[in-house]
Image (cartoon, grey):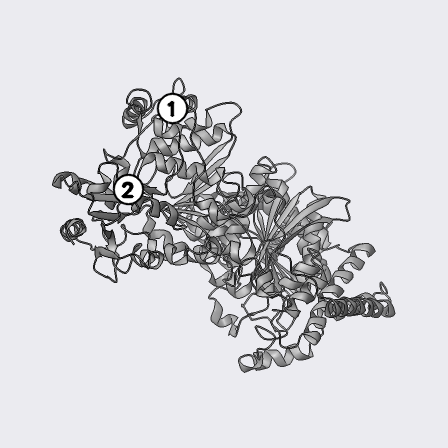
Amino acid sequence: MDKYSYISNADVGYLDQMYQNYKQDPTSVDATWQKFFEGYDFSQQRYGENGNGATATVSDSLSIKETQVRNLIFQYRSFGHLKSRTNPVRERRNHNVNLDHKSVGLTDADLDTEFDVAAEIGMPKSTLRKIIEKLNAVYLGPIGFEHNFIRNDDIRAWLYQKIEKEYYTYNPSQDEKKRILGKLNEAVVFENFLHTKFLGQKRFSLEGGENTIPALQTIINKSAELDVKEVVIGMAHRGRLNVLTNILGKTYEQIFTEFEGNVSPEQTMGDGDVKYHLGYSSHINTPSGKKIYVKLTPNPSHLEAVDPLVLGYTRGQIDDEYKGELSKGMAILIHGDAAVAGQGIVYEVVQMSGLPGYTTGGTIHFVINNQVGFTTDYDDARTSIYCTDIAKIVDAPVLHVNGDDAEAVSFAANLAVEYRIKYGKDIFIDLLCYRRHGHNESDEPKFTQPKLYNIIAKHPNPREIYVKKLVERGEVDAALADELDKNFRNQLQDRLNEVKQKPLPYKPQKIEAEWEQMRWAKPDDFDKSPDTGIKESVIEKVGKALTNIPEGFKPLKQIEKLIKDRTTAFFEEKTLGWAEAELLAYGSLLLEKTPVRMSGQDVKRGTFSHRHAYFFDANTNDPYCGLNNLDKSQAKFHIYNSLLSEFGVLGFEYGYAMSSPSALVLWEAQFGDFVNGAQVMIDQFISSAESKWQRMNGLVMLLPHGYEGQGPEHSSCRPERFLQQAAEYNMIVANPTTPANFFHLLRRQVTWSFRKPCVVFSPKSLLRHPAVISPLKDFTSGAFTEVLDDNSVIAKEVKRVILCSGKIYYDLLEAQQKRKNKDTAIVRLEQLAPFPEKQLKAVLKKYKDAKIVWAQEEPANMGAQSYIVRMMPKVDIEYVSRKASASPATGFSKIHKVEQEKIVNQAFEI
């Protein structure tokens, strides 16, 4: 192990200058360097055998030379990757890296001198010439090892051993070479076959990067060998069809049928998606005799957007299926070079990798680096030297590997798995390759990269290169390699002929095993909510857990008051506020063995200091969670304060919910206004995944919403956007106004025998509003109520019905009471989507001749107004709202109050 890791941030010239400064004045350098130079000087001392200063036995010059050789090794380890032979079609850029032995003070006269420091790279005492030969072979070959920036001594030492010993002598077995060739043959021939048989059709081919396929197989096989049970893959469209067939085992007939397009609209379920966005899963038998489950998640064209979903799904499987053992599930994220460097979501997921709530025990990041993004050259695509420089924020090693060298790729794949299993951390493989065609197969790449594509046109494919190498080494007969090509091509042609003669019938995508107990929702499921009441004994049990603390635990004074207030609410007044109702919903589900997971910014306490799911000892800061102390047989309550991210964390929780249909999974925005930071996740997954990919999901999104004079950034979660997307029963959009109804809404999510995403416009000021309470009897019976009628009026006396949703109800209620208005009913839409048409009709039927008014606090072009127009086209409705506005709300408190008062008055007077 390298004891002097602090040297890694200095070059040799700088070290020498510091040493000269130290000799003149030891205090002129940092204390750490003082110690280093003291040790160095000590090593140079002459000690005579008789202790009286006689001739020394150690040569000054040889000792200095040993240090200089050590410095040369350090230079190779640190900068060798910048001169490695990793680019198959371009010359390496000059990064002004000098690895010549003369750069560290050695001369040609030293080349045949033997040095003990050779032991550092696994050699016996050897000449400088042989040391340099090994360093060149290891660090300037087809793999550029970028690892010396890692700050953990043990990890660097382990990597030195793997690289300088195992890689230096790496020679796959004959069986492994045949496996690599077989997979490479499948990858190359498959792409070539599609190109000739389906001319001009988009497939986003893998040509130029075909070594991705044997690499993935190596990763999967090695993972199974090391007892990984499940691998979850996320990737974009490039090479996806090849991965689907040659890794996951989707049949060639299925792919050919999708190319033929033999599907009629009436056969399909939902709207479907293009073939290179679809997911697949299968169980794979590996050479070690172990079986492993491999899943490729569906994804949109939005590059890297699937990354957090994959990690969330993996963590969900780890928590549920593998009881928290991180080593059992593994994620592979396949990136493109332009996307991994340019998309901010990559930073978010890498930053999440070591956090307790989001770690998956290390992700293997595999970059198909074809050196161009659509038409953009890498010089215009990033500032960093490498597209993978994001790895450095978490000290993840990067293996830059030549995409034409199949065996180097195989070594990198094996090393990545071993590293991930041993250290539980992320690692990157940067496969330097090329894209033989344009962005898609009908695109002309020479418009923007004519020189590069002239080179690519003449460049042999990776299979041809590997076959040539095997033949030259006498390890494979050329005729055998040709036969391999011919046989597979004939097999593909036979499959295509079968499809042309008898197309496969359309089948919706297969549902995953964990979802088999679920069914698809039907329209009449939304006519009446299922009963979600709980027993009084459950309320008492949860109440006690929320109001008891362990002996010796010292809460803050404010928390002591909170506990007292909770005790009063549960056991004396027997009415619950919003926070108590929410925690009761979670506790009741946990007692029913339904896991609950929640994350978001500040969720343990709650943005508005209302939830306090955890207490923290005032003296020790030790945490305590009452909901994890309900019962020995209860399910686990997982609640995590997230990193400051919307896109990444919402995507993670969506993925978690995708893997765990039996759990209640929630994400809460700090303020609903910030949810648009995750708009891609909402548009491409939450609102449309069921229609595109037949994938249900039960994620709950809590979006604090309400106009309270806090300005345009703290007022609106943009309800209009969710309501615009609401169609085909794709998701629940709710705006509950009572604690009990919120309680039943949460429980309904996991009581249904199907799953739908649920968007909740949750309250802010209502969290402590004295009128926003529910008696315990509302929790022991009943169900979520989509439409709440006005029980304070006599129906036959009502001349006006004000329809509304959310917080404005309490403003209207206050005005109704002040006005002593008995001829106006205030009816609340607690659920906006799916639109509760039958329930609303049943309520409005009581008020036959009444005037209907829709009142909202949002501007006319926002909120639910446009949605109500669309949902109730035949009803004569007057609309009251703020005037249409470019901004959601005013930034001036006084103006807000005037506007709010005007809306309320108009609702009663218009």
Q: Quadrant of residue 860?
A: bottom left
Q: Disc 1 vs disc 2: Cβ atoms closer than 8 Å? A: no
Q: Position of residue 340 (x, y in %)?
A: 52, 60
| Residue 115, visible in the rendered structure | no
State the quadrant of the N terminus: top right
**Residue 869 position within the rendered picture, expressed as x and y whole percent measured from the top left:** 31, 59
Is 897 on the left or on the right of 613, as rendered? left
Q: In the rendered view, does 269 fall on the left or right side of 494?
A: left
In which image quadrant can residue 891 be found? Answer: bottom left
Point 24% across, 34% down: residue: 771
Question: Picture quarter containing residue 484?
Answer: bottom right
Q: Position of residue 886 (x, y in %)?
A: 25, 62
* Distance (Cα) linking label 1 and label 2: 23 Å
User: Helix or strand or loop: what does disc 1 sit on?
Assistant: helix
In the image, which disc is placed on residue 543? 1
From the viewer's perspective, is 764 left or right of 438? left
Q: Earlier in the sequence, mark 1 or mark 2?
A: 1
Above or below, comparing residue 95 to residue 808 in the picture: below
The residue at 62%/62% (across/down) is: 240
Quadrant (top left/top right/bottom left/bottom right) for the C terminus: bottom left
In this picture, is 471 found above or below 163? below
Residue 662 on image: x %, y %: 53, 38
| Residue marked by disc 2 | 764
Q: How many C-alpha atoms fall within 10 Å of the one at disc 1: few (<14), some, or many (≥20)?
A: many
User: Front-most of 219 and 172?
Assistant: 219
Above or below, 611 against 704 in this view is above
Closer-to-camera residue (440/25): 440
**Who is closer to the viewer here, 450 or 492?**
492
**Which amino acid type is marked by label 1?**
Gly
Residue 747 visible in the picture: yes
